[in-house]
Amino acid sequence: MRTKVIEPGATLGVFGGGQLGRMFAQAAQRMGYRVIVFTDETDAPASQVTFQTIHGDYRDPNIVREFAEQVDVITLEFENIALEAVTRAAEITPVRPGARVLSVAQHRIREKTTLQNAGFPVTPFRELQSYQNVPPTVEDFGFPLVFKTTSWGYDGKGQRKVTSLIEANDALEMLGPEPVIAEKWIPFAAEASVLVARSPRGEIATYPMLSNSHHHHILDVTTCPAVGMLKELEPRAREIATGVAECLELEGLLCVEFFVTENRELLINEIAPRPHNSGHLTIEACRTSQFEQQVRAICNLPLGDTSLIQPAAMANLLGDVWGDGQPNYSVAFQAPGAYLHLYGKRNARHGRKMGHLTVLDSTPEQAADRALQIRDQMRSNEAKLF
C-alpha cells in the first residue's frame, strides 16, 4: 500500500462537505478524478461540484461502509470528524490522514502532549480537571491564561481568556464539564503557518511560510512570502513542519500554525491535518496549490513544486461584506491580479466564511493593501451601514 499509486480515473472520497472539500474536488476533477463527499450537512458547498454526495451521520456504520466501498482512498476536509468513522472506513479503504493523526489533532491536550513529548516547541499548557487545578497553574504561568475546550473548537470558538480566579471559575463552568486545557498567554510578535505534505512513500514537501493576521479570532489576511523576522525564521519553521509530518507518519496535507514570540521563538499553536484557510493563496501564487498537493499526497503521486510564482495576499470574505444585500462583485472582477473565490453558501451571516479574495502584486505588502481596499469597496451599501 505504501508504493501503490492511485491514478487518474479513480474515485476519491472526502469526509466533510465544506469549502475545503469543494476546492479539493475542483482540483481533483481537473486531474481526472471523481469525488464523492460524505457529509452530515444539507446543501453543503462541496456537494455542488462533486460527482456524488452521501448524506448521513458519521457515527452510522452502515452509511460509512457504503461510502468507503465506493472510493479508492478517503481524505479529510476538516478535523471534527467522528474518529470511529475514520476507523471503520479504514477497514475497507485507505484513509489519509488516518485515525492516528486525526486522534492527535482533534484533541488539544493529546495534540500538545504528543508534540511536546516528541521534542517540538509548543505553548506551555496544563490540563484542568477541576477548579482545584487552577491555582497551581496560575502559580506556574501567571495571568492571563487562555482556557480552551479539548475538542470541537475552531475560529476562536470554545475558548476564553481569563485574568482572575473569578474569571477562571466562570470559564470552567462555560467550557466544561469535560476537562479543559489552560495555555499560557503568549505575547506574540507574529502569527505564521507552514503547509507540509507527505505521501505514503515518504516524500515530503513544505510550502513557503505564510504570515497571518486575525480579527476576532478568525483569519483575516495572509501574505507570502515572509519578510523581515519571519523570513529569517522560515527555515526553522519548515524544519519543524517536516519533523511533525514525519513524527505523525502523515499521509496527506498538514498545516502547522505558529506563534512567533518577541524573542523570535517559534511555538506551535496547533496543527490541522487538512488544507488550511491560510493556504488558499497557493491556488494562484504557487506552482502547485494546496488542494492539488492534497490529491497528489493521498494518491501517492509525485508531490508538486511548492515554489512561489509571485508575492500574494489572501483576504477572507465574511458575511459582514454582504450585510443584507449583495457585494459589489465588479470591483474584484475589474482589479488586475485579483482572484475572487466564492463558496456557494446561500445565507450570508456575520462571521461566516463566504469566500476569499487573492491578490498578486510586486510585494506582499502591496498585495495586502490592494486586497483590503478591494474588499472594502465590495461591501454592499447595507453592510456599510454597520
Image (spheres, grey):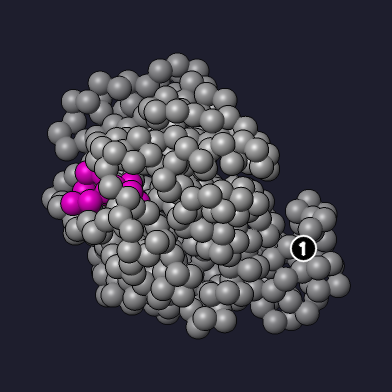
Could you tell me how many numbered marks the image carries?
Answer: 1
Residue 87, x across and y down, in percent: 60, 54
Q: Is residue 319 magenta?
A: no
Q: Is residue 229 above or below residue 150?
A: below
**Extent of the magenta region:** 282-295
Q: Is residue 143 left or right of residue 308?
A: right
Q: Is residue 294 magenta?
A: yes
- Per the picture, the main secondary structure of the magenta-coloured stretch is helix
Left or right of 137 on screen, residue 62: left
Residue 339 quadrant: top left
Quadrant housing the N terminus: bottom left
96 or 88, nearer to the observer: 88
Q: Which residue is drawn at 40% across and 50% down?
A: 275
Q: Nearer the viewer, residue 163 or 10?
A: 10
- Which of the 4 image quarters holds residue 375? top left
Q: Name the residue under label 1.
A: 179
Front-most of 366 and 275? 275
> In x, y percent, where is residue 342?
36, 29
What residue appears at the point 40 percent right and 42 percent down from the top-left corner? 12
- Which element type, helix, strand or loop, lies under badge 1? loop
> Nearest the camera: 47 or 6?
6
Percent position of residue 239, x then y = 34, 76
- Relative height, residue 297 to residue 319 (above, below): below
Image quadrant of residue 62? top right
Tag 1: amino acid: Pro
Residue 259, given in percent of the width and then of the height, sits at 46, 67
Name the residue at 15% across, 34% down: 336
Mark 1 crowdedness (10 Å alpha carbons): few <14, some 14-19, many ≥20 = some
Left/right placement of residue 154 relative to residue 304 reads: right
Residue at image position (58%, 74%) is 114
